[in-house]
Image (cartoon, helix red, strand yellow):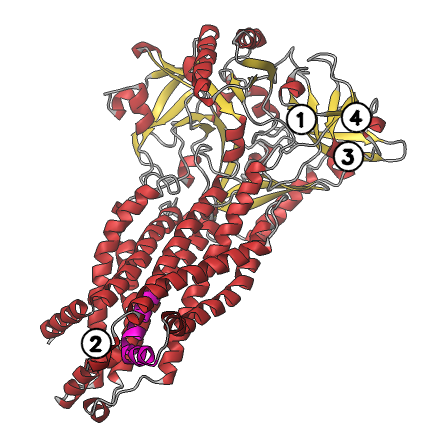
Amino acid sequence: MFKNYFKIALRNIAKHKVFSFINVIGLTIGLSASFIIGLMVYYDYTFDNFHKDGDRIYRVVSNFTSPEGKFYNSGVTLALEDAIRDNSNFESVSGFYVERPSKVENVALNIEKKWPKFVVYTDEDYFDIFQYKFLAGDKTLALKNPNCVILTTQRAAEYFPKLSPQKIIGKTLLYNDSVNVKVTGIVANLKGRTDFVFQEFLSTPTALNTRLREEFLSKNWNSTNSSSQLFVKVSKAGNFKSIQQRFEAIATEHIDDYSKKYNQKREFILQPLNDIHFNNDYGIYNWEKEQASKDLLQNLVLVAVFLLVLGCINFINLNTAIASQRAREIGVRKTLGSSRAQIISQFMGETFVLVLIATILSLLVSNVLLNVFSDFIASDISLELLKSPIMIISILILLVLVTFLSGYYPALSLSKFNTVTVLKNTVNVGKDKVKFRKFLTIFQFTIAQVFIIATLLVSKQINFMLEKDMGFKTNAIVSIYSPRSEIQLEKKQLLAQKIKEIPAVEKVSIGGYPPASRSTNIATTTYNDGVQNVQTDLQMIAGDTSYASVFELKLLAGRKRLNDTIKELIINETARKTYGFATPNDAIGKMVEISGDKIPIVGVMNDFNQRSLKSGIRPMALSGDWYRQFYSRFQAIHVAFKEIESSNLNAVMDKIQSAYGTVYTEIEDYRADFIDETITNFYKREQKISKLLNWATGLSILISFLGLFGLVIYTTNRRVKEIGIRKVLGASLFEINTLLCKEFLVLVGIAFVIAAPIAWYGTYNWLQDFAYKTQISFWVFLLSGFAMILFALIVISIKTIQAATANPVHSLRSE
């Protein structure tokens, strides 16, 4: 029986080649999208899911509230660990401090590693919370004493190539040319996907022999550093309400007078382990990796669902449309004793064959899509993930679900045919079925239309952000950063002088980060206007006296600073308004208090955007290198070019790099960032969303128009004789084409009317995340509606014109 069903399924697929092709293509697109997006969801949701008792592991983070708003920090004060260690609600408590040594050496083997990443100071409790496999060393003793380190197998292989873990124990590494550290443990790298990327675990007492000594000794309650991390494992009987109450009591107990005076508040919050991978407020430990987004993944799932539904709709529409052509087959089967259940099973089997073909094709397409979206998805996502049991089960469930959604309604409709009516050849298509097909067609084009409008508006917003004036010069400027270990200002000055000698260079400045950057340096300031204190956080940007000239920051009042080290401020317009000065001139000469020092305002500059246009402009000030006698805040040389051809830019950059090499021997630390590229990188996520929408729009249009084309073929084939009669009676080609197109264009028009408010609502809410946003222009809706109707007309006319131009003699004599 099943062999017979399979043969009939293949024969019907071959008989209705066009409809089968449309069905397979629609399902292939939907399944391909589902597989790729399923891989992405599975990949991100399985981070750190392998830790024992992971549901009881939490990171303690800090939230700060002030009149300026709410701020988040993944770190805590170093003092908090001791304050909660004896809390009975916690099974384990462990803090670690993220550090990046400038250099680590294996002196015996002459192996040197500069600026190694993923180094932390921690204690043995860390390995109670996170279960690493120890290959050598004693977990309970390895970090008890100063100057001890545990290495992962990956990092151990870099420092001690070809040595077994047991032979590495007791070997010595030299940190920062001054601290000799003994290897006391080797652990296997965590096997699952994880955000805990650390490779070197130094014992906490070792920090007392480094520049961090005072920080670890003082454990200042008012100092919060994102490098200072704290994890807890809550006991099985732990009371979360009690924990939070204790956190609140600690925060209240250690609030300083300044915070009380200016209504500032700090909270300690438990962040679940499974939230770390997604929560952008606190971040992950690999700063070079973009954080995953739950919202984006959820939107991706919706896209996959919509594409699959569109493919299923094509299947339902076309199979119910051609149902009458199989009426006699069903009548014969019923006459020979087939039950309705058997007929339904047969047609569901045919559907499954088509779904199976689509699945095989989609696996091939998925491999191609992984390459197309290589900049959109993690580099280690591959089809290999489909081999996991969860993915295999999910795919099987998906195939069954798609088969049911696609085939059940057509099978139900086909099995309802009355045997006598069928054999008398008097089968008619019910009005309800026609209405249902129309509903599904409208639904298809509504989804496609929403995608088109959303794509246009998202692209419009991205172009708006990229083209909007940031308030300073952004083109033809590059920032050259000195090596991280470089503390000598003289070398930066020497490099700046060498760069000035390059003919294509117009201006040079030495300073901190450029106006557009992700760096934040905030100082809490107070201005007394004689009546009250005005307190605000001021974003500080460091630069020499040429900084404003290089970036063309407009001075609205006052003067430039006298030199690089004098304590003077040039504030922006937002700061001027915050302090309450009526005009820029009113601010000149006024004194602002920062850390107890009274500092004069000598200038007011125009506002400019330091971040993406998602955020507004905050109070900001340009300052000098105030603490140069202790350390310099100048890390970069900012270079403005004259007007040069882009083809010559590489040659100029080669000269700059050559000059860098003559000043610094650590040429591997060379870093050059163009300002316009930095600004473009602000909108990476939006650009990915735009690319996603482009693909979703294209695929949804393709599926919808394929389905529409199939319905047009079916409709025109049914009306061949009607067309012939109309031609004989004198109807023109235009009149016949209009008659055949009208019904379908009405459906497309109704879809537009439904889609427009849905698309407006979605894009309006999305735009609320931006401080600066484009208008939701009426022309976008008109353009998308006109484009959809035009494309639909072209698709419909391909078949209708062919039918209308056919010889009526042939159509009228056909049986």
* Labels 3 and 1: the sequence-earlier one: 3
Please tell me whether mark 3 sits on a helix, a strand or a loop: strand
What secondary structure is found at the residue carrying circle 4? strand
Q: Identify the disc placed on residue 592.
A: 4
Q: CA distance from mark 3 to mark 1?
A: 15 Å
Question: Residue 65: horizontal and vertical position, in percent?
Answer: 67, 42
Residue wearing tag 2: 810
Residue, disc 3: 535
Q: Looking at this view, is 639 or 228 the one in front?
A: 639
- Give the residue at the far right of this rendering: 530
Camera-nearest residue between 276 and 477: 477
Q: Alpha-carbon distance for marks 4 and 2?
A: 94 Å
Q: Tell me the kind of residue under disc 2.
A: His
Q: Position of residue 388 (x, y in %)?
A: 26, 51
**Sequence-wise, which precedes: disc 2 or disc 3?**
3
Label 4 vs 2, first from the N-terminus: 4
Which residue matches tag 1?
A: 540
Instruction: State yes or no: discs 2 and 3 in contact (Cβ < 8 Å).
Output: no
**Image quadrant where one finds the C terminus:** bottom left
Question: N-terminal of the two: label 4 or label 1?
Answer: 1
Tag 4: amino acid? Val
Q: Residues within 10 Å of mark 4 (few under 14, many from 20)?
A: many
Quadrant of the image occupied by residue 157: top left
User: Relative to the observer, which residue lies in front, 807 or 685?
Assistant: 807
Determine whether, in the image, residue 562 is placed left or right of residue 383: right
Note whether residue 344 is visible. no
Magenta span: 708-729
